Amino acid sequence: MTKTSPSMRLDRLLSNLGYGSRKEMTAAIRNGWVTIDGADVTDPGHPVPLDRARHVRLDGEVIDPPPPMAVMLHKPAGYTCSHNDLGALVYDLLPDRWRIRKPPLSTVGRLDKESTGQLLLTDDGDLLHRITHPRSHAAKHYRVVLRDPLRGDEGDLFGAGGFLMKGDTRPLKPASWVPEGPASGSMVLDEGRYHQIRRMFETLGNLVVSLHRYRTGGLDLGELPEGTWRFLGAADIDALFTP
């Protein structure tokens, strides 16, 4: 038996995606600002199968995907991964309408304010849990620049398992550290504790001056320009869980 995609009223769909209130979307539809497959639709209650939402245009523009949706953002330094903190937020780099999208987008883990690189966001709680679950293959890859020259034993200390960060009572899981210069290298983590890489090197008396995430699982940040984002498709999601 063929499975039928769930449908939603057109006015509710547009409102849930953040384009405006139900009242505003009802007016937009009745004013002829919405088309489906190129044909005008003026009935706010018109049912839209969610797997065909890409055929809906508002004021000539294809609407955003309905849930589940995932995006990848190239986070610049100076932005906080929060909805409510003061100052520049990563959500400022996304369309304003996504602030009232239902369900809301959440970051998959965090990058601290001064760190840069790949940040994933989704409204799919199951996907978020899969990516962050300790048993997933979605390891996080970073490039690290340090204040002081490397000691030379960082790879052995971090990779053996049992490394204890200053202030912690629970040792870290093994992490992969590959030096790439006198004071730089790449780190791969299978867990994500608060400020983990910075605290690892702080425990050794060093200071991270630049931290950039460039890959999660098998999904690379690629050539995505800093401060911009793109939607993630099915192949991207599969890549997240490819070691």
Image (tube, rainbow, N blue to C red):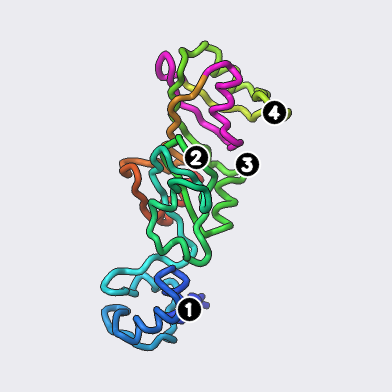
Q: CA distance from mark 4 to mark 3?
A: 19 Å
Q: Quadrant of residue 185?
A: top left
* Region of the chain picked out in magenta, as a range: 179-206
Q: Which mark is residue 242?
A: none
Mark 4, Cα crowd under 10 Å, few <14 / some 14-19 / many 20+, is few
Compared with 44, 237 (above or below) is above
User: What kind of residue is marked 3?
Assistant: Pro
For marks 2 and 3, the one nearer the N-term is 2
Residue under label 4: 168
Residue under label 3: 134
Along the line of sight, the residue nearer the viewer: 19 or 4:
19
Residue 230 in picture, x, y percent from top left: 36, 53
Residue under label 2: 111
Residue 62 in picture, x, y percent from top left: 31, 69
Compared with 19, 215 (above or below) is above
How many numbered marks are there?
4
Q: Which mark is residue 7?
A: 1
Q: Quadrant of residue 143?
A: top left
For marks 4 and 3, the one nearer the N-term is 3
Residue 140 in picture, x, y percent from top left: 50, 37
User: What kind of residue is marked 4?
Assistant: Asp
